[in-house]
Amino acid sequence: MFTPLICLVTSGDGRSAAIVREAAAAGVDLVQIREPLLESGALHSLTREAVNGAAGTACQIVVNDRLDVAVAAGAAGVHLRADSFPASRVREVAPKGFLIGRSVHEPAEAVAATAQGGCDYLIFGTVFLSSSKPPGHHVAGLRKLQEVCGSTDLPVIAIGGISVENAADAIVAGARGVAAIELFRRCRSVRSVVSQLRQRFDTPLDLV
């Protein structure tokens, strides 16, 4: 038995500091700062504010693909794109205890990331239909999620179209947690969403 991890991915609008503070206080385990439109200085400022906002909680802050910003701002780690540099290279220069994740989209990518070494976790998607993706974007589905989870001994976090209603399905398929953008961006209360997710996870399911 384990407690599924909940990850909030920022929406890319550059105004995420407030929701990060709310998420940390609500019990979100991991926040991925994903702000591709921000320049380095603004990204550093946002990340530092997020780190300060999560201080005193169990929430960890990682920065999408910017190792330099993550280290400089005191974040817990970095999340690498699927086509980014090897996690093993990051591990060589990162501070002790630094958290390193990677996005994958196929079982083969999960196998390669595992064999390469350096990763602490993987994020796989898009699992369900997602409003944050363009029309026609490929949806992997639960079967592919199950294949990815079975191809690695690293924790896999499911992303893409995650909702309160389907999150537990991803856990049953083998994911160790769920990550979401729209689920949190559109909600009135992050605390309420986290509470609902925890209730779903605590119902009698075959979480092995």
Image (cartoon, grey):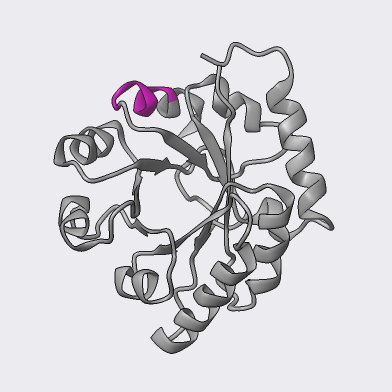
* Residue 59 percent across, percent down from the top left: 58, 52
User: Relative to residue 45, is residue 181 drawn left or right?
Assistant: right
Q: Residue at x 25, y 61 (%)?
A: 94
Q: In this rendering, is residue 67 above or below 142?
A: below
Q: Residue at x 21, y 59 (%)?
A: 90
**In-image side of 165 versus 171 (left or right):** right
Q: Residue furthest front?
A: 56
204 sits to left or right of 100:
right
The residue sitting at 31% across, 26% down in the picture is 153
Give the x, y percent position of residue 139.
48, 40
Up/down of 33 relative to 109, above or below: below
Identify the image quadrant of residue 112.
top left
In the image, 131 versus 145, the foreground residue is 145
Q: Quadrant of residue 109?
A: top left
Quadrant containing the N terminus is top right
Residue range (magenta): 146-152
Residue 143, above or below 184: above
Residue 118 placed where, x, y %?
Answer: 22, 46
- Image x and y of residue 146, in percent: 43, 23
Main SS of residues in magenta: helix
147 part of magenta stretch:
yes
Count of marks overlaid on the render: 0
Camera-side residue of 56 and 34: 56
Q: Is residue 41 above or below residue 103?
A: below
Viewer-proximal residue, 127 or 173?
Answer: 173
Residue 163 is a magenta residue: no
Q: Residue at x 28, y 55 (%)?
A: 96
